[in-house]
């Protein structure tokens, strides 16, 4: 049985939970209290020296960190990661976009609003993150014009990776109202057989 | 012929140049003056809506952005990206680590030192980035204990991705002296047949 070290509030964790359920793969889940230092203990650092969740424990004892690498591992050989060389790379393109140009602005804004008390410093941080988050949403909105999914004509782990923090962008202060292509794409993901919401452990 | 939109000062561009040369793949190179807005023109945004280099133009006219996705495309089917499912994911693990936990601190420090005049604001930014960059180098140093390469027993695109900004970390104010495993690994990369330095266009 796979074991997922996870946190219910984490979009990076949710990506993995959601794909496991879409693929019908059973797993155990360990809720890690990040705010209490659970990822910084010696025990956990031996599993992932970078001290982050999600980390997936495989049946042979290997621990695989990095949400998007875990998605690639789970999706290898399934339709969620196409075998065609270019399509495969384009799926990765959107996953690297997600970690570099999206998550650091949209997920970080959400985290500030949920876990830091209101203050002038918090407001200044949110103001700095806002235009970069809007840029990322703009790139997605433009790309989705006339497209159902990010790569090719089927859902892939590129969509799953981007869905996690995009669908809760409102919790980071980003109004998705003006992004009609993104909201239609969010509805397509929610309609997938096996879909489970972020709040489901 | 492949065309690489590139900038000589960019480690993300260098990753791609280096792999193309290690694989012996000919390519044209277009130097993009990032600081003069070359990646923000309508023409370039039509190639990569996220407005960044490197972007690789394929022979069929497709433009592929994201340095690490380009590496995966070029390395697919070569020993630089192993076919084994777990090894493949572990290579990606280090590439996502590079973009999320390494580049934003080490490459950004280097960029500040090279492209921003000295000021109290610059010094404060560098001070904030320093511990996170050192954390990333610490994770690499620990992982390389007893290992020649990041995944398995052969060089992969995980090594190439991490090499680009690590070998010039000194230009970002990071002294590699205390990191003996990293400096030995840098020497192994430099000894690869076909290796070319960052300064080579």
Image (cartoon, coloured by chain):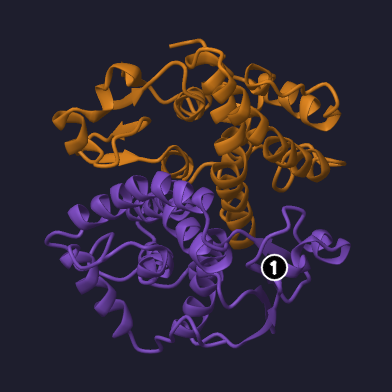
Chain colours: A orange, B purple
In the rendered structure, the residue with mark 1 lies on which chain? B
Residue positioned most to the left: B146
Q: At x 83% / y 32%, what residue is drawn?
A: A181
Whole-percent x, y for residue A119 in the image: 56, 16
Query: Image quarter for residue B43?
Result: bottom right
- Residue B96 visible in the shown view: yes
Total marks shown come to 1
Left or right, B195 with respect to A79, comes to left
Whole-percent x, y for residue B190 in the image: 32, 82
Q: Nearer the viewer, residue A26 or B156?
A: B156
Left or right, B146 with respect to B8, comes to left
Left or right, A194 with respect to B98, comes to right
Query: Image quarter for residue A144?
Result: top right
Q: At x 54% / y 30%, what residue is drawn?
A: A108
The quadrant of the picture occupied by the C terminus of chain A is top left
Q: Is residue A29 above or below residue B138?
A: above
């Amino acid at each position: 049985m796979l074991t997922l070290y996870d946190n219910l509030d984490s979009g990076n964790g949710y990506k993995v939970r959601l794909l496991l359920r879409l693929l019908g793969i059973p797993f155990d889940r360990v809720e890690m209290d990040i705010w209490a230092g659970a990822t910084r203990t010696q025990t956990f650092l031996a599993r992932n020296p970078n001290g982050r969740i999600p980390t997936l424990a495989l049946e042979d004892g290997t621990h695989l960190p990095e949400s998007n690498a875990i998605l690639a591992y789970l999706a290898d050989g399934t339709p969620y990661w196409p075998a065609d060389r270019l399509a495969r790379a384009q799926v990765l393109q959107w996953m690297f976009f997600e970690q570099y140009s999206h998550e650091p602005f949209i997920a970080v804004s959400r985290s500030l609003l949920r876990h830091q008390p209101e203050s002038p410093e918090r407001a200044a941080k949110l103001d700095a993150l806002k235009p970069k988050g809007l840029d990322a949403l703009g790139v997605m909105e433009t790309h989705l014009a006339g497209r159902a999914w990010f790569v090719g004509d089927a859902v892939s782990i590129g969509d799953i990776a981007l869905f996690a923090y995009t669908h809760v962008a409102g919790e980071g202060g980003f109004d998705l109202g003006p992004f009609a292509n993104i909201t239609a794409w969010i509805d397509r993901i929610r309609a997938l057989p096996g879909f489970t919401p972020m709040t489901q452990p």
